Amino acid sequence: MSEKNGNVWVFIEQEGGKIAEVSLELVCKGTELAKKLGIKTEAVILGNNLDGKIETLFHYGCDTVYQVEDKALEPFTVLPYAETLVKMLMEHRPNILLFGATLKGRELAPRVASTMLAGLTADCTDLQIDDFEDKIAKKMYKNKLMQIRPAFGGNIIATIVNTWEDPQMVTVREGVMKLSTPDTSKKGEIVKIKPELSAESKVMHVIERVSAEKAVDLKKAQVIIAGGYGVGTKENFKLIRQLANALGGEIAASRAAVDAGWINHDYQVGQTGVTVRPKLYIACGISGSIQHRAGMDQSSKIIAINTDPEAPIFSVAHYGIVGNLNDVIPRMIKAFKAKA
Amino acid sequence: MKRQLMVFVKQVPDTKNISGEAMTPEGTVNRSALPAIFNPEDLNALELGLQLKERYGFKVLVATMGPPNAAEVLRESLYRGADEAILITDRSFAGADTLATSYALSCCVKSVKNIDLILCGRQAIDGDTAQVGPQLAEKLNIPQICYIEEVIDVNDKTVKARRSIEGGYEILETPLPTLLTVIDSNEPRPPSARNVMKYKKAKTRSELAKVHGRGTDYTDASDLLEEESKLRSKNLWIHEWDASKLSADIERIGLKGSPTKVKKIESVVLTAGKVVSVPPTEEGINALIRELIEDHTLG
């Protein structure tokens, strides 16, 4: 039955052999979905010189890795990637295909879905398996992928289902699926593929490519001190830095603070920034728009400091301090230094 | 003949400014209670198109798919310097997901012919999917460059552009025709007063018919036909195309042409929480820090 129905596939994003964190998150989620459906979890990775770079995918739960290598697949350009993936999908007909909602994923997945005439849901924050009854068409669908995502600027959460032929395709937001503990003893099957690329797929030329690591990896931070518009000035942002230094945390910001030019976009938490789930998130002068909350409301502990007692940030906070940052933050630093 | 580029734009509800009244008691969004605006990144796409008009002499065509009143964003485009506008409207387009939408837009491009560049905003703020651009490129079987920051050069055969990538940028060159999706990387120009004076009289067929209290099938009304030909000759005619004019396959548009179905919609409810109120005093903050150290959140 499993062969006929197709497996769960995860598109693995890599750059110079380094696998993107979101791809590992998706392998974990994919494994969970595959278990429910009684099928396998398979990964497909495209690039060049990938030997020895993919074992970690087995540790997180992959049964099979399709390792597809060609000079034209490194660095990423959309046409050869799309062509290769489409051929593989036609051959293997996976049930589900997951992409990270990264710049690459969001460029590639729609192109592939369009050729496959498959439904595609962008930027999912949750995936479940359930039945779906199409009341208009009076049709029942068993064990479909529930594709759950925010829409309308985050004001609503929609559950979407693909009713056409498989694959059921989604892109998934970075940082929302939890990493399981890797089991380094696990092994799986590597299937090496040398794609035959058409001349048509090679018409895009990369003239120049400049890519630097991000200034900060907020997803790994255990303690995050985030400043918002209420911080007031760029100068005043030093308060946020001081608290972060004292508590051993990273600084972050809301979109308003980034737009004001007080800090760069690498530090932005929220729908158009990074999604984080640290042990402690301290929101300083952040009103808590729905877009910001979407990026931090899964934090284990949230402290909100704001002069406005009605600020929506308090609705997701565990501790609320109504007060001025200039008073509260120095008191926090002093209290911590005295106790720690 | 002048070289042509086409900019696709969308009228969207202003999701960044949703107020309480815009949510229905059932928790869905009441679109009609939201102001309709020009999708922000589509303004960036239009601005890029207008810059290419100035640099290389392109004719700028603007098209949108939507209800009849989406003609407003087309007039907005004419006010800024677009040369010609097309409204794609038909009840049978309703309920389209991104696949059905990109198919309908591809029919529009094929009807116009001889388009060197297609420009779209990266994504629209009502769905934030960023899917229609790449899907449209695929439907037309042409290359795409997403997340454009600037166009470096266009010659007879190729376009060279700089685009954003994870942690940096990339300069790509592709053959024409190509589709570009544009991010918030330029300063869209405001409408020009002279263009507003001229194009505020621009009309679609539906709008002309409505002014005269008629249906859009006014083939027997000589007064309307005369006014239409006058508007056309002054370049004040906004084309209004339906599914048949686009030769669109009826199975591939609207709800029928959409593989994705919405199972349910829930509003994001603020769970008035179990927030512990901490006084901003030294005692209050000391107690809080002590608690966080004791439960190993800190330290």
Image (tube, grey):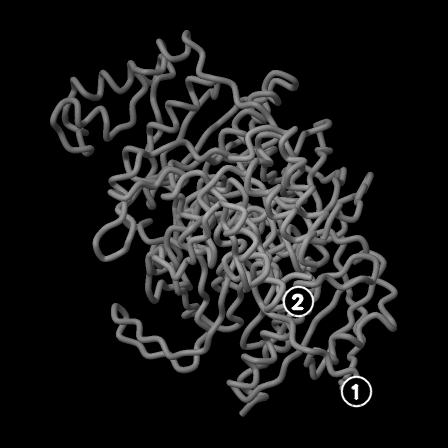
For residue A110, side relative to residue B69 (left or right)? right
Badge 1 amino acid? Ser
Q: In the drawing, what numbered circle is on residue A185?
A: 1
**Pick the front one: B58 or A68:** A68
Near-viewer residue (B14 or B12) = B14
Badge 2 sits on which subunit?
A
Secondary structure at badge 2 equals strand
What residue is pinned by disc 2?
Answer: A11
Q: At which x and y percent is residue A100?
A: 62, 61
Q: Is residue B278 left or right of residue B56?
A: left
Mark 2 is surrounded, within 10 Å at the Cα level, by few (under 14), some (14 to 19) or many (20 or more) other residues, namely many
Compute the Cα span from label 1 to label 2. 23 Å
Indicate the quadrant containing the N terminus of chain B: top left, top right, bottom left or bottom right.
top right
The chain under label 1 reads A
Instruction: Please identify the quarter of the rendering in which residue B240 is found.
Output: top left
* Residue at the image position 75 percent from the left and 53 percent from the top: A76
- Can residue B1 be spotted in the picture? no
Identify the residue at image location x=35%, y=17%: B236
Which type of secondary structure does the marked residue at label 1 adopt?
loop
Between marks 1 and 2 in the image, the one whose residue lies nearer the viewer: 1
Q: Are marks 1 and 2 on the same chain?
A: yes
Residue B133, picture quadrant: top right
Q: The C terminus of chain B is located in which quarter?
A: bottom right
* Coordinates of residue A23 in the picture (x, y in percent): 67, 66
Residue drawn at the location 79% of the way across and 45% of the way down: A211
